């Protein structure tokens, strides 16, 4: 298929690369230059502006947050203004339920189609085509988008015809991962202050009951004294917990564990700055225990 | 080996059965009668009192809590009084760090040996020899106990020569499982009140990032409207979170998520009584959201 | 002085009445009709539209939330469009820090002046001129507004020349009051389930260490089985806690007790609807304890 | 009356002094010597051992915790062994509900009488006879003890004939005070990081809605950068919150704010040691906000 790809950050580059490897014709665009060279080397076309990335069957967006997506969609000469009637906007960013609803309406009003396809996985998973995708949107649009989604993921789940539900599921998933980080952090603080070896402990957990990627990834990061490389930044983690809480607020669903996570992120950012991997909240329990 | 087995509850019966199937000679004892019939049919000897279960190379205890274990160990004609010098008491119950230390000292004082070998897994895992065991104790004693531990588990991890560290690890493990239950409960309340199908949601989670037994077991229980059968009771869940908090208190490790879990258990027991599986705390989020 | 008064709810009516009693000439306006009769009987002039309320030296606004204030200020023919150059907008509503900053800029841009003067106290305090006011704004503007502020309060505190600081202080004050409600609710649940008489308990507290109006008012409401009349509604309470949390978020100040209060309000609204006094969150502890 | 006084710490010295000033004949005892000199100068008799402090109509105990009280009561030659039949043990220490019940039974079994009379107030209030006392016990015993209680307090409230209820009320009172500290700490962190002057803020609060001693005392301590002198130590604060939580656990009353306070105390002790006034938990919010 002919597809535009907007947003060439840590995640987007891997996803676009997989599209190319699956044989799709990809036109890439990024606001800050210089991130597209490798992709161009792999066969991508470089767009000079947003409109040039909107001339195919679909355009995929993978940007940092609501504000960035509003910018590329609603600005003059943005996606809404440029995408042909009938073409599909596939949004893979982690965004609010509110923005997802607004995009659904705006694209429908412009005769375009909107599919939400948020992804689960960190940058290395994106590069290795190991992402999971939760997709939602009008049945026919999802079906047409499927070759693209499959090219970027190890598996794509189709949830419903309401795009915002996929975005909510994505937010709930990040909440679940952050819960794993917090619980591991508290458990590690407890056993480590008692003298148990952290690495052996994580090995025990992750080869038995907690034999899942998420425990292995974050267990290894938390058992290590070195700061984790920034795969998913703490401010973005805070953003997602806030969006989950906001959705819960609208739906009248109290989430005390999500509230705890929000406070953890705020403590982290207040004390250690904004340039950290989100897993760093898992080290606050040790810090609170007096072991900085 | 000749081994006594004390405590034939949901867990103990499966563990003793596996000892028999591995060819050990097992003498079983339970305070309330009538739980030993099947085991006797499998070749176990029925002890008329505690002392009779203490005549082998080792005695394994699997009882509900500190009080129950203190009872079988420290009572007149209990294990401490009855076990031969040099024999091993293998404690598989989930008990406090404080009691583990006391047992270590008391058995040493009586010339006996003490190994802590708490288990991870629910009754069906016990029956199917799918438990994980975290063992700690003097090196030689652990080595001698290993054939018994291996007969009862799919894998046994040896942690250290301080028995209480295994008990702390067990408590931390139950804390991690309860954290999974709470986080799943909040996530399910959020997406379910939004209209997402709970079972499909759990399937998506557990076939992707959260592809681990603990998410599958508790996801299935929480996605179901029916009350879960009591595999591990809520009062015992509360007990374990309290013991983890108590250990954290002594070690000066604040654990806010554990505090949240403790409050959840109290709410559950206050509102719905004591006869519930501990997974029921995961349904409180839905209840708080007005969907009882 | 000639002053307009916009917003004749439970609070505004009492405040406007005190302005009249102090001899000011007051033109009142409310979007929904029929709330002004008593005030007109006391000598107020009834404005047919917002612009008519903006012809004096100052206009005071006392409305429910950010949205309502944005409406009366920024709409066509609203306060921003109608207020003469040099006149003062005195905002007594409880609003966000963000809106306060925006109003400061907008009014300055229009040659008008802006003073934030949020109030502490419930409707009966407003009627009895027992409110406290925290005022902030340009020094000269605050000085000119003082006769109006003094007519509506038992005491007015001048904080700084940055209006938003007064709004933040107001939000922090509502957070403190909600904290009192929550703490009293938990303490009452504890002693009441133990058999202590709630009213005697509240009397003991409030005639000794907690001899302050806020404990007396909320202690009496919580010791009573009957639902409290709606003096300050639960959805407005939730709004203020959210605004305090939002300010904390921007400033990177984690507030775990505020997070707890937010969850309490959500639980209350989810379970019992939106038509309650905010003190009802103080009865959730009893409900959690199984005593509905 | 002839009365013994056991426990001459910061609180006990002031209380005993007031008994002397009211004309009672007081025999004082303290385990560590050298704290009684001033009292002896005021007319007190110094007891060489516990038994000598038990020869009057009553003995008052004011010690640090359950362990200390168990020691002076249940040890050989302790109060239980020494107090004459019919004499009254008045316990003013802050102790657990469980110990209060045990004391009630033990003294009754020895033909003695037990009155719980815990006090509210810090050492300077004790010295100035500004304490409040919550008393509970058999009606006749409380009546006989009243001259002593009145000599030590500005007011004594009689709660019920079950001593443990007074102890529970005392624990709930300390929970309420700690809640004030936490809420003030969070509010101060919020406004101070925004640039509001902390002392002016506290003055505004405590001269208006929060015009109560508890807000004045702790507001002043928290608005000051200097560490507070130890009036009531942080480990004792933790002890009382734990006892309130333990009572809540037994009664099945979840208290999430008390759980938060417990975690605050643990963080404080883990990070800053055990030699602090309990008000120091109110400075953790500022610390979490990155302003140590």
Image (cartoon, coloured by chain):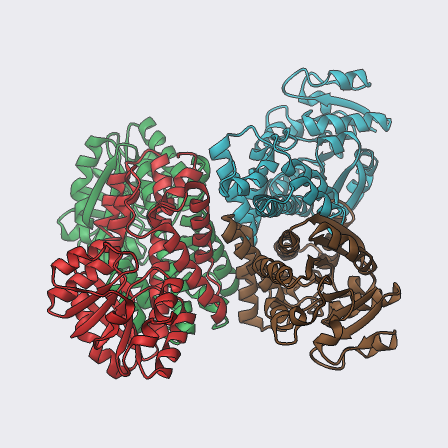
Chain colours: A red, B green, C brown, D cyan
Residue C180 lies, in percent from the top left, at 65, 53
Residue B5 lies, in percent from the top left, at 26, 47
Depth check, front residue: D1 or A39: A39
Depth check, front residue: C173 or A258: C173
Residue B67 lies, in percent from the top left, at 42, 44
Which of the 4 image quadrants contains residue C20?
bottom right
Judge whether C286 appears above or below D27 on screen.
below
Judge whether D266 appears above or below A69 on screen.
above
Tell me, yes or no, if residue D137 can be seen here. Answer: no
Residue at image coords 10%, 69%: A23
Residue at image coords 27%, 66%: A49
Which of the 4 image quadrants contains residue A51?
bottom left
Residue at image coords 65%, 76%: C77
Counting every numbered tag in the picture gives: 0
Depth check, front residue: A252 or B254: A252
Residue A139 lies, in percent from the top left, at 26, 82
Which of the 4 image quadrants contains residue D74?
top right
């Amino acid at each position: 298929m002919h597809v535009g790809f907007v947003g060439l950050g840590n995640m987007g580059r891997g996803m676009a690369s997989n599209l190319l490897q699956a044989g799709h014709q990809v036109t890439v665009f990024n606001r800050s230059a210089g991130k597209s060279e490798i992709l161009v080397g792999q066969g991508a076309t470089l767009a000079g502006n947003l409109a040039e990335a909107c001339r195919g069957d679909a355009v995929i967006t993978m940007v940092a947050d609501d504000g960035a997506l509003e910018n590329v969609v609603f600005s003059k000469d943005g996606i809404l203004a440029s995408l042909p009637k009938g073409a599909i906007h596939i949004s893979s960013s982690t965004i609010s339920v509110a923005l997802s609803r607004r995009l659904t309406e705006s694209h429908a009003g412009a005769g375009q189609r909107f599919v939400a396809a948020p992804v689960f996985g960190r940058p290395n998973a994106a590069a290795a085509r190991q992402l999971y995708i939760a997709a939602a949107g009008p049945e026919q649009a999802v079906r047409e988008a499927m070759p693209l989604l499959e090219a970027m993921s190890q598996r794509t789940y189709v949830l419903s015809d309401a795009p915002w539900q996929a975005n909510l599921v994505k937010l709930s998933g990040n909440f679940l991962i952050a819960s794993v980080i917090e619980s591991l952090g508290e458990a590690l603080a407890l056993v480590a202050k008692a003298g148990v070896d952290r690495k052996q402990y994580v090995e025990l957990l992750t080869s038995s009951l907690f034999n899942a990627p998420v425990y292995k990834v974050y267990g290894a990061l938390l058992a290590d004294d070195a700061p984790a490389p920034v795969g998913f930044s703490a401010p973005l983690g805070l953003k997602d917990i806030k969006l989950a809480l906001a959705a819960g607020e609208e739906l009248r669903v109290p989430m005390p564990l999500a509230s705890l996570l929000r406070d953890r992120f705020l403590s982290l950012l207040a004390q250690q700055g904004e340039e950290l991997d989100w897993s760093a909240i898992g080290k606050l329990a040790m810090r609170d225990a007096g072991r900085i």
